[in-house]
Amino acid sequence: MLYSNSACLLDMNLYQQEGCTVLKPFKSVLWILLLSISLITGCGQAEQADPGFEEKKKKELTPAQVLEKATKAAEKQTGLHFDTTMDQTLNMETNGMKQSMDQNMEMEIQMTREPLAMHAKGTINMNESIPMEMYFADMTYYMKNPQGDEWSKMEIPGNFDKEKFEELLNQSSSEDPQAMLEQLKPFQNDLKMTHEKGMYIITLELNEEQSQKYMDVIVEDKMDQILNMMKDTGVPGEEEMKSEMDKFLKNMKIHDLKQTFHIDEKTFEQKKVDQKLNMEMMLEGNKIKTDQKMSMEIKGGVDQITIPDEVKANAVDMGNMKEMDGMGQQ
């Protein structure tokens, strides 16, 4: 997959819809796992363009060709280590009264594909700073209590095929190069590319109509993956999730979107992604406008993720997802 940021806003805004001030540990953890590499904060400072770029322009690849090579290079990576940050300002209007809220997220994430594992650690800052740390390995989630040092664990239900589950998760974190290019196809004429200090800098900047169309394609793709996974793995709440997402999309309006991809000119490895987003949505009759900046900086590869012995030994067993979902509905 060519790593993109667009799906991150889904994660944060879904929590806002539920009125959460902290993450719901295990019902929400699938979102973190599936969308975590789709993240993330403000654009870096502009660099000086290579003065010889205009002379070399005719010999350069097209933006679409560079993206295709970057996607194929990403497929070869067995693991990934990256830092993500997100800053957003929410402007809310209720009964003629206006209120503003700033939010920030900083996360360090490590993931491997074979075996499938993840470690995420960081903070989510709203009215207060909420620490977060979690692991996933061997079909088990481990999450640290944000108010202490205690750990909880929850197993994936055992009534499905482990290999199929891992295959579905991997599909959610890596896309077919052609599929990615198909998503961008309507906007290839809008791609702009410069060359700065050994990097291809590819920018996609869309107006309101284009942004909405682009986001609809991405969201539909992600939701199909998640709903299929929930259905095939026995995780409950498929219909509820679909209903919530349909409601979310119906009430969401994107005004403009800008994404910038930083790609190494020699290896075609992606080094950084920046995104700016301006959107509004209706929530329970209230209008919420969001200005969001996200960034993901790829630090390198990861060979192995090891869960500390003390976490495994002391984690409180919360059962499995199906049991917990039933408890939450009582």
Image (cartoon, rainbow, N blue to C red):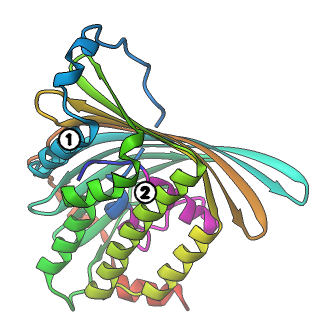
- Residue 142, picture quadrant: bottom left
Relative height, residue 46 to residue 96 (above, below): above
What amino acid does circle 2 point to? Ala
> Relative to 167, is 216 on the left or the right?
right
Residue 215 higher or lower than 88, as above or below: below
Magenta residue span: 6-31
Amino acid bearing label 1: Gln
Residue 21 is covered by the magenta coloring:
yes
Name of the residue lying farthest toward the front: 58
Q: Nearer the viewer, residue 275 or 57?
A: 57
Residue at image mark 2? 7
For residue 298, above or below residue 130: above
Mark 1 closeness class: few <14, some 14–19, many ≥20 residues within 10 Å = few
**Left or right for 131, reference 299:** right
Instruction: Name the residue located 23 percent from the left edge and 57 percent from the top edge.
Output: 118
Query: For the point 8% across and 49% down, which residue is it?
Result: 76
The residue lying toward the viewer, choosing from 261 and 103, is 261
Please report whichever mark, 1 or 2, sits nearer to the chain's N-terminal start.
2
- Magenta stretch contains residue 311: no
Q: Please identify the quadrant where the C terminus is shown.
A: bottom right
Q: Where is residue 228 drawn, in percent x and y?
A: 31, 81
Q: Say whether marks 1 and 2 touch (CB < 8 Å).
A: no
Question: Is disc 1 placed on a helix, strand or loop?
Answer: helix
> Judging from the image, what secondary structure is the residue with disc 2 in?
loop
Q: CA distance from mark 1 to mark 2?
A: 24 Å
Residue positioned most to the top? 51
Image-based side of 178 in relation to 192, left or right: left
> At which x and y percent is residue 280?
67, 54
Is residue 66 visible in the rendered image? The answer is yes
Which residue is denoted by mark 1 in the rendering? Answer: 65
